[in-house]
Image (cartoon, coloured by chain):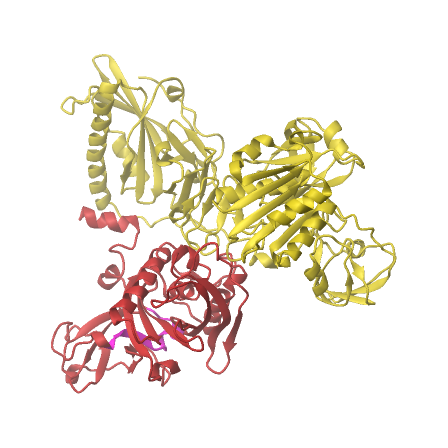
């Protein structure tokens, strides 16, 4: 009799063990499998990149089972209100009822650990240690048996399995002598011996709930084609008989109360109530996994998390990179939600670099560790447009790439217009290829010719069309002017500047009252509102600190703002309801802010 | 025997409710805030003269009948007066209060107010008042009401009828409690609909108002496709059989002279059939009143207000009260 190593001490709590929860075969692409372990329902789905997601089977919004939703490849879409959650991180990436707003990062499904091994998917409530490694299965060829659901408790099923008998040649009239050996409190091996030949089956019993289990058997050999079907059918028949016996026994046993797994509370009551929590914080640590030259003067960087998984990036989001030389710079993420567990950036070496891009180009190497902020999205993508135009100038293509990925994955109508000097200047050409005909290149154009092209592509605005522009200042100005001339409303024109080229005038002095904090502060010349707020202990998020990114925006209740930013559009500036605290000031003696 | 245990063990609705409750351990409502209300029993159009019939209301068996002169009776079920037998008013020892209103027989297991909430449209002479369907759903009454008050699910659940992608945005609307009747209202709601009513032929943005006059009853008013200055009224009057099983009545008061009753009913039944699998897949089945149990967004303003309103009324049946 072969001796098996015990996998775990017998006393270990069921919640701390790894359990099989599905067969690998249960997870074809674009399908969601409904599983259950220790009373908790699970939505299990394989993404297009082969990652297996194991989530609480419950949309955070209204508790609808995610298993009745749709697996869209890299995102799971809830059937009730179309909320989307990203592959891997399980973060919410889109709330269709509010297409203009980025979902709060805190909206993230509960995930459970996963391991795919021996044709089974393993998980657990809170497993300690590594998933089981079974030497017998590691080396030999194996054959997973049909899983058998049984209406009986784990222990009752194990008791019966310890007496499981089968034949070596599939003949039900010729059952062999068997011996059983427990591997841990949920699994055992059964070996049949006949005429000096042996066959071993490992049984892993999945505790579905107090009174329900699934027997998942793996045969430790791989019969030839002719015997394979016979063997499978034999075990299927014998296990079905076993199920009938167990269930008859279960009827005699007192019914145990079903398990009641706790559902975690959501961290916030409502996503718009989220208050900014800090200044420029670099809460994440990443390692440069790959750095390569993707185009003339542009490097691509792939950043991988050290420690906890990276938060879900939304299309259009950017991060602050805290550079080894102390500078902080913003870069857009080029990959879409659900595309891998890393962040991809494209960084152009600026000819007038003040140390940011040159540091990333020259100093930072593969393997280096960088501190970055969590992604922020002030350039968020609506997914309710009848058609979306993405207009990129040079390195401005980076946020638009993540948008293009998302629009393509969602099968929405879009075009990506990419203005660049030559085709050698096109960043991420391999990614552009994936978009096929949706990409239109405009190479080597003068400013006049660029304007002409912009006019041509912005012709024929229709309701529910949206355009997103990112590129150098003059091109952005031209695009915004032309869009306005062609009848695009401000609300349909979205733009992101690299930087604010307006010369900031910080000479004025004025008073700021905070409506919610009942506090009045003097803003002297030479100091920004943001600086004075922070000096008075008021925490406010910020990122670029030059009026380009929109992170430090606050609502204005009263007063006449002097904006000086390039984030708000003209009608938003005219309305005077919001300011960027890093550059905006007051024309009136007093501003009342809603914080 | 094995089969029966099999279904029971699965923990799905199946045979468990409400039959199990009737046979074994009925979850009888003891919540005064609910017991004292009027509850719909059945549509009066389906009541036969002179025969005893029976339903379950709030975990209790209730019998009812109608006499030839047209008087309705309801009483707590008495084994001496079995369902299906000929009805004689004199044998009922203790009658429950009854109302005949909006095409339904209403009763109460507590101490109800004199009258039911008003639906002024019901009495307008050019309207058609129709009972569209009674549908059993394995969910709690408040989950069904909350779903009825929700615009955001139209493109996903009623695809191509009441909503369609990419027209998914729920624009800001107003919510208030009418202090006079303590009714919850949402006004100035608008939503794009490809086929808002049985009579619609093209898509358009439709105006909506929602009204909750009763924890388990609600109405919506939407722009009439025939006359944009008037509204159609659609009501959902729920009889809660158990905390997690309901029989929902759909009531219509429409401006529609041309469609047949059966066409209108089929349209409403299609809509409800689309909601049913969603309602039966919500976990937990009871509506959680703790705001941190689920994740509301701005478009859920009415749902948030409804949960708070239920809390303030002291409703504990069909909900998970705030801890």
Is residue A416 or residue A107 the one in the foreground? A416
Q: Position of residue A293 (x, y in %)?
A: 66, 27
Viewed as shown, does residue B224 lie left or right of A431? left
Chain in yellow in the render: A
State the residue lying farthest toward the left: B86
Viewed as shown, does residue A160 lie left or right of A115? left
State how many labels appear: 0
Chain in red in the render: B
User: Was residue B41 drawn as part of the magenta stretch in this picture?
Assistant: yes
Q: Position of residue A109 (x, y in %)?
A: 50, 47
Is residue B256 or residue A527 the one in the foreground? B256
Note whether residue A471 is visible.
no
Q: Residue at x 45, y 70 (%)?
A: B310
Quarter placement of the C terminus of chain A: bottom right
> Which residue range is magenta in the image?
B29-44
Q: Position of residue A484 (x, y in %)?
A: 66, 57
B107 in relation to A271, above or below: below
Note whether residue B51 is visible.
yes
Determine the image quadrant of residue A309: top right
B130 in relation to A360, above or below: below
Determine the image quadrant of residue A15: top left
Quarter placement of the N terminus of chain A: top left
Determine the image quadrant of residue B245: bottom left
A271 in relation to B62, above or below: above
Q: Residue at x 51, y 39 (%)?
A: A88
State the residue lying farthest toward the top: A196
Q: Residue at x 33, y 84 (%)?
A: B125
Viewed as shown, does residue A460 lie left or right of B237? right
Is residue A509 or residue A374 the one in the foreground? A509
Q: Position of residue A99 (x, y in %)?
A: 54, 55
User: Was residue A231 drawn as part of the magenta stretch in this picture?
Assistant: no
């Amino acid at each position: 009799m072969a001796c098996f190593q015990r996998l775990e001490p017998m006393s270990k709590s069921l919640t701390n063990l790894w359990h099989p929860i599905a067969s690998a075969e249960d997870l074809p692409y674009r399908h969601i499998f409904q599983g259950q372990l220790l009373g908790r329902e699970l939505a299990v789905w394989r993404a297009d990149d082969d990652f297996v997601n194991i989530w609480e089977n419950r949309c955070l919004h209204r508790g609808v089972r995610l298993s009745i939703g749709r697996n869209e490849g890299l995102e799971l879409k809830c059937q009730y209100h179309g909320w989307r959650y990203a592959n891997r991180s399980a973060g919410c990436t889109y709330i269709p009822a509010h297409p203009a707003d980025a979902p709060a990062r805190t909206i993230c499904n509960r995930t459970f650990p996963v391991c795919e091994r021996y044709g089974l998917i393993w998980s657990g409530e809170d497993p300690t240690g590594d998933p089981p490694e079974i030497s017998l299965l590691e080396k030999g060829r194996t054959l997973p048996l049909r899983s058998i659901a049984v209406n009986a408790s784990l222990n009752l099923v194990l008791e019966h399995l310890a007496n499981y008998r089968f034949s070596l040649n599939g003949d039900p009239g010729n059952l062999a002598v068997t011996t059983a050996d427990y591997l841990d409190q949920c699994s055992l091996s059964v070996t049949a011996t006949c005429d000096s030949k042996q066959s071993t089956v490992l049984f892993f019993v999945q505790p579905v709930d107090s009174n329900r289990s699934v027997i998942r058997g793996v045969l430790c050999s791989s019969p030839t084609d002719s015997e394979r079907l016979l063997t499978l059918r034999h075990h299927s028949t014998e296990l079905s008989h076993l199920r009938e016996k167990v269930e008859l026994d279960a009827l005699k046993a007192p019914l145990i109360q079903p398990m009641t797994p706790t559902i975690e509370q959501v961290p916030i009551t409502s996503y718009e109530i989220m208050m900014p929590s800090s200044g420029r914080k670099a809460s994440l640590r990443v390692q440069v996994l790959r750095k390569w030259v993707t185009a003339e003067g542009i490097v691509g960087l792939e950043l991988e998390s050290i420690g906890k998984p990276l938060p879900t990036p939304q299309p259009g989001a950017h991060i602050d990179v805290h550079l080894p030389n102390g500078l902080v710079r913003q870069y857009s993420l080029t990959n879409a939600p659900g595309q891998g567990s890393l962040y991809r950036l494209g960084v152009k070496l600026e000819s007038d670099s003040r140390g940011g891009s040159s540091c990333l180009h020259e100093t930072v190497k593969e393997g280096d560790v960088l501190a970055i902020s969590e992604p922020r999205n002030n350039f968020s993508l609506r997914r309710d447009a009848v058609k979306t135009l993405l207009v990129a100038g040079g390195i401005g293509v980076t946020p638009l790439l993540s948008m293009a990925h998302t629009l393509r994955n969602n099968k929405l109508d879009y075009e990506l217009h990419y203005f660049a000097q030559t085709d050698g200047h096109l960043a991420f050409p391999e990614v552009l290829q994936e978009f096929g005909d949706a990409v239109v290149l405009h190479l080597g154009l003068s400013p006049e010719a660029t304007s002409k092209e912009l006019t041509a592509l912005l012709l024929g605005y229709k309701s529910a069309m949206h355009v997103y522009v990112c590129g150098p200042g003059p091109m952005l100005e031209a695009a915004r002017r032309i869009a306005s001339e062609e009848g695009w409303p401000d609300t349909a024109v979205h733009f992101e500047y690299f930087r604010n080229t307006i010369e900031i005038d910080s000479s004025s002095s004025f008073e700021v009252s905070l409506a919610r904090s009942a506090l009045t502060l003097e803003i002297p010349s030479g100091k920004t509102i943001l600086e004075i707020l922070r000096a008075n202990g008021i925490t406010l998020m910020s990122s670029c600190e030059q009026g380009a990114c929109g992170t430090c925006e606050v609502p204005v209740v009263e007063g006449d703002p002097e904006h000086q930013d390039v984030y708000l559009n003209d009608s938003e500036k005219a309305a005077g309801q919001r300011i960027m605290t890093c550059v905006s000031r007051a024309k009136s003696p007093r501003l009342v802010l809603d914080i | 025997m094995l089969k029966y245990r099999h279904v029971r063990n699965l923990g799905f609705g199946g045979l468990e409710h409400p039959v199990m409750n009737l046979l074994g351990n009925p979850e009888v409502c003891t919540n005064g805030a609910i017991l004292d209300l009027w509850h719909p029993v059945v549509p009066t159009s389906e009541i036969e003269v002179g025969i005893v019939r029976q339903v379950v209301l709030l975990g209790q068996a209730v019998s009812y009948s109608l006499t030839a002169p047209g008087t309705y009776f309801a009483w707590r079920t008495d084994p001496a007066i079995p369902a299906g037998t000929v009805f004689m008013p004199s044998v009922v020892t203790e009658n429950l209060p009854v109302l005949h209103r909006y095409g339904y027989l209403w009763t109460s297991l507590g101490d109800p107010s004199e009258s039911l909430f008003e639906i002024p449209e019901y009495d307008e002479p050019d309207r058609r008042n129709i009972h569209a369907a009674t549908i059993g759903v394995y969910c709690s009454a408040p989950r069904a009401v909350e779903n009825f008050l929700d615009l955001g699910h139209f493109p996903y659940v009623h695809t191509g009828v009441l909503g369609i992608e990419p027209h998914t945005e729920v624009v800001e609307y107003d919510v208030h409690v009418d202090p006079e009747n303590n009714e919850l209202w949402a006004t100035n709601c608008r939503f794009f609909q490809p086929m808002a009513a049985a009579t619609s032929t093209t898509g358009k943005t439709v105006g909506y108002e929602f009204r909750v006059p009763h924890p388990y009853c609600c109405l919506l008013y939407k722009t009439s496709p025939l006359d944009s200055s008037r509204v159609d009224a659609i009501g959902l009057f729920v009889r809660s059989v158990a905390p997690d099983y309901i029989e929902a009545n759909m009531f219509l008061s429409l401006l529609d002279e041309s469609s047949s009753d059966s066409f209108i009913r089929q349209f409403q039944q299609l809509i409800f059939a689309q909601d049913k699998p969603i309602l039966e897949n919500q976990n937990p089945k009871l509506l959680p009143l703790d705001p941190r149990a689920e994740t509301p967004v701005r478009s859920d303003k009415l749902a948030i207000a409804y949960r708070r309103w239920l809390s303030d009324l002291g409703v504990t049946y069909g909900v998970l009260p705030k801890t």
